[in-house]
Amino acid sequence: MEKEFKLTKKYQFRKKCKDGCSRNYIIYFLNGVQILKQKYPFDEKREPPYDAKVSISEDYLLNGYIHQTRVYGLRCGMSEEQRSKLKSREVKFPVSKKVLNEMGVPKDLKI
């Protein structure tokens, strides 16, 4: 019988860090266990609070990496034609292999 896995994420905005600065985070969980905490991407050319206008979609875990599709400039009410012209990119981030092995996650399973 194959184990069932569920990948979830939580956003943490304006988290006060030890250096006194506020940062935004995305925290990924696999079956309730934290597997990755990353800073939310932002655009240095834009002014706050508009610097974090990145849409992250199509998140999945495969072969020890969290894969994401990032779309820049996405706004509510945009038509499909406008969305297709936006800049997007595929990125991936490593997850601790030790944690994945302890949880018994198979290597080629897409979650």
Image (cartoon, helix red, strand yellow):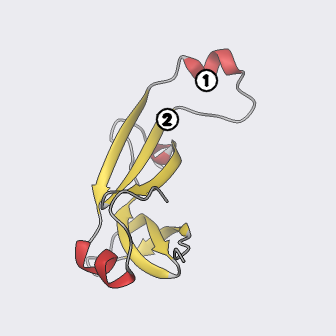
User: Which x, y percent locates residue 58?
Assistant: 53, 46
Q: Is residue 10 left or right of residue 15?
A: right
Write the residue at 32% across / 84% down: 102
Q: Which mark is residue 83?
A: 1
> Residue 65 lies in what quarter of the image?
bottom left
Q: Quadrant of residue 28?
A: bottom left
Residue 80 in percent (x, y) is at: 68, 21
- Going from N to C along the chain, the mark reached first, 2 or 1, is 2
* Relative vertical location of residue 82 with respect to residue 26 in this rendering, above or below: above
Q: Secondary structure at mark 1?
A: helix
Q: Is residue 23 above or below residue 69?
A: below
46 or 60: nearer the eye? 60
Residue at image location 47% in from the left, 54% down from the top: 60
Quadrant for the N terminus in the image? bottom right
Secondary structure of the residue carrying numbered label 2: strand
Who's the residue at 45% across and 40% down the image? 70
Mark 2, other Cα within 10 Å: few <14 / some 14–19 / many ≥20: some
> In the displayed structure, would residue 40 be above or below residue 29?
above
Q: Residue at x 29, y 78 (%)?
A: 101
Q: How far apart are labels 2 and 1 at the CA level? A: 9 Å
Q: Which mark is residue 1?
A: none
Asked whether disc 2 touches disc 1, contact meaning CB atoms under 8 Å apart, the reply is yes
Q: As shown in the figure, which amino acid type bears the numbered disc 2?
A: Val
Furthest toward the front, the residue is: 1
Q: Position of residue 39 (x, y in %)?
A: 36, 61
Q: Which residue is mark 2?
A: 71
Residue 74: give x, y in percent of width and height: 58, 33
Badge 1 crowding class, 10 Å Cα cut-off, few under 14, some 14 to 19, many 20 or more, is some
Closer to the camera in the image, 6 or 75: 6
Query: Which residue is nearer to you in this view: 3 or 91?
Result: 3
Three-letter amino acid code of the residue under disc 1: Arg
Q: Can residue 23 be seen in the rendering of this structure?
A: yes
